[in-house]
Image (spheres, rainbow, N blue to C red):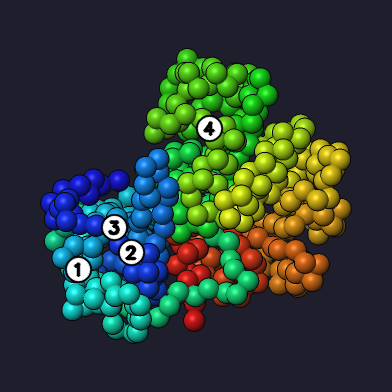
């Protein structure tokens, strides 16, 4: 990820955080003027935030349909203007660079910073420059406000695989890390899928593969199945690709509830064994979220027959939120709230309608091809899509008319 810290104007002591009303009013679908050869014709612009120890951090993202591109910037107000500073990236390649954007008072900052901002088509124009790599940005880019973001009354879940994407996608933080959970909303995610395993001493942790390998962790003295080690050993000697520790399930759920806006967590059970500890933690953090005035749905994923059998052995399984990847009959047997078939089965609108008639939801997974993402959103009736490219899901969902 390019380092955007070189813009001296953005470091001005007079630069301040944007008010919430300005951020909300700025969100929308924008027409791309300058830069459309690189980014395409439209961008969906949306704000996100995380709560840090001492303050809140706000970022604005722009999602594009071309080459699964996006930008992520920090935004501030300065001398009556709005300035944004960050980086852009194309997920289909290693292309990336710095981007600096400005909304002058005359181009709509006066509207956004007013007590009751009212945005109309063309009233907000964002101008700026972008560059390649760490080079000083010089190429012109511009966006003009077109219309509000699409939002269906029933809502839609944009779910990030492995909490934000795979290590192979060259993201700035590691898959299934606390740091990724804190970053994933910048990619457009409204919820996450995370992979649950157990350590030798029975601690539920978040880790995808069966064993310690160089795809997921830095080289260390530990090798072999992850369940061969205690959590203390993993914490002391193992680091994820970008240097983070393997997190516990408790740490991740605590981060979701107290530091993010995320509203959905899919606990993909990658092991065969009792689900009781996972159930207990899901129930605990559901209550913690409610105490914070938040509705965070936490579901236990049931990807196979063994997990279903262990789920059915729980004394109150029928009232435990779950997601079943198998047949509709299995969904009914487990009383799963969500049916989640592979995307390769197609849109299956007839089966999705049957699921909806039962008061349940349907998600598709894991959908990464832009053409299929567009098709599923345009022609399908799913309530959410799981992807390694949540920014692509966000683009096609939000630009709908």
Spatial distance from mark 4 to mark 1, Cα to Cα? 41 Å
Look at the numbered discs 2 and 4 and tell me whether their residues touch, using CB distance below 8 Å.
Answer: no
Mark closer to the observer (2, 1): 2
Look at the numbered discs 2 and 3 and tell me whether their residues touch, using CB distance below 8 Å.
Answer: yes
Spatial distance from mark 2 to mark 1, Cα to Cα? 13 Å
| Secondary element at tag 3 | strand
Q: Determine which quarter of the picture holds residue 123.
A: bottom left
Mark closer to the observer (2, 4): 2
Q: Which residue is mark 1?
A: 81
For marks 3 and 4 on the same chain, the one whose residue lies earlier in the sequence: 3
Spatial distance from mark 2 to mark 4, Cα to Cα? 33 Å
Look at the numbered discs 4 and 1 and tell me whether their residues touch, using CB distance below 8 Å.
Answer: no
| Secondary element at tag 4 | loop
Determine crowd level at label 3: few under 14, some 14-19, many 20+ residues with C-alpha closer than 10 A.
Answer: some
- Would you place residue 186 above or below residue 357 in this image? above
Q: Which residue is mark 3?
A: 17
Q: Which residue is mark 4?
A: 247
Report whether 50 appears left or right of 375: left
Spatial distance from mark 2 to mark 3, Cα to Cα? 6 Å
> Residue at point 14% right, 55% down?
9
Q: Which residue is mark 2?
A: 19
Mark closer to the observer (3, 4): 3
Q: Residue furthest bottom?
A: 121
For marks 1 and 3 on the same chain, the one whose residue lies earlier in the sequence: 3
Q: Position of residue 4 (x, y in %)?
A: 22, 49
Q: Position of residue 25 (x, y in %)?
A: 37, 73
Depth order, front residue of 92/303:
303
For marks 2 and 1 on the same chain, the one whose residue lies earlier in the sequence: 2
Q: Position of residue 387 (x, y in %)?
A: 54, 55
Determine crowd level at label 2: few under 14, some 14-19, many 20+ residues with C-alpha closer than 10 A.
Answer: some
For marks 4 and 1 on the same chain, the one whose residue lies earlier in the sequence: 1
Depth order, front residue of 101/284:
284
């Amino acid at each position: 990820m390019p380092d955007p810290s070189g813009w001296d104007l953005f470091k001005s002591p007079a630069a301040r955080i944007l008010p919430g009303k300005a951020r909300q009013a700025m969100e929308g679908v924008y027409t791309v003027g300058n830069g459309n050869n690189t980014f395409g014709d439209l961008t969906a612009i949306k704000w996100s935030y995380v709560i840090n120890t001492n303050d809140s951090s706000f970022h604005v993202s722009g999602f594009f349909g071309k080459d699964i591109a996006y930008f992520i910037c920090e935004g501030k107000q300065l001398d009556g203007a709005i300035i944004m500073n960050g980086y852009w990236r194309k997920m289909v390649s290693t292309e990336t660079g710095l981007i600096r954007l400005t909304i002058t008072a005359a181009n709509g900052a006066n509207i956004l910073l007013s007590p009751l901002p009212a945005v109309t088509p063309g009233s907000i124009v964002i101008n700026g420059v972008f560059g390649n790599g760490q080079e000083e940005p010089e190429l012109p880019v511009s966006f003009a406000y077109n219309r509000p973001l699409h939002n269906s009354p029933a809502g839609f879940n944009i779910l990030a695989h492995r909490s934000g994407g795979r290590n192979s996608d060259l993201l700035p933080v590691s898959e299934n890390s606390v740091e990724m959970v804190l970053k994933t909303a910048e990619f457009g995610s409204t919820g996450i899928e995370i992979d649950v395993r157990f350590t030798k001493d029975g601690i539920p942790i978040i880790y995808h593969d069966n064993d310690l390998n160089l795809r997921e962790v830095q080289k260390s003295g530990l090798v072999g199945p992850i369940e061969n080690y205690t959590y203390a050993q993993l914490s002391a000697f193992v680091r994820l690709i970008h240097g983070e520790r393997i997190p516990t399930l408790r740490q991740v759920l605590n981060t979701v509830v107290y530091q993010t806006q995320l509203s959905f967590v899919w606990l993909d059970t990658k092991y065969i064994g009792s689900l009781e500890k996972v159930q207990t933690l899901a129930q605990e953090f559901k209550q913690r979220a409610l105490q914070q005035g938040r509705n965070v749905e936490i579901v236990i994923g049931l990807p196979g027959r063994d997990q279903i059998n262990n789920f059915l052995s729980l004394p109150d399984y029928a009232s435990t939120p779950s997601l079943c990847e198998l047949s509709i009959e299995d969904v009914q047997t487990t009383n799963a709230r969500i049916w989640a078939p592979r995307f390769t089965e197609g849109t299956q609108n007839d089966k999705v309608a049957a699921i909806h008639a039962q008061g349940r939801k349907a998600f598709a997974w894991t959908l990464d091809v832009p053409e299929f993402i567009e098709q599923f959103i345009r022609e399908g009736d799913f309530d959410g899509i799981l992807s390694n490219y949540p920014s692509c899901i966000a683009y096609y969902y939000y630009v709908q008319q």
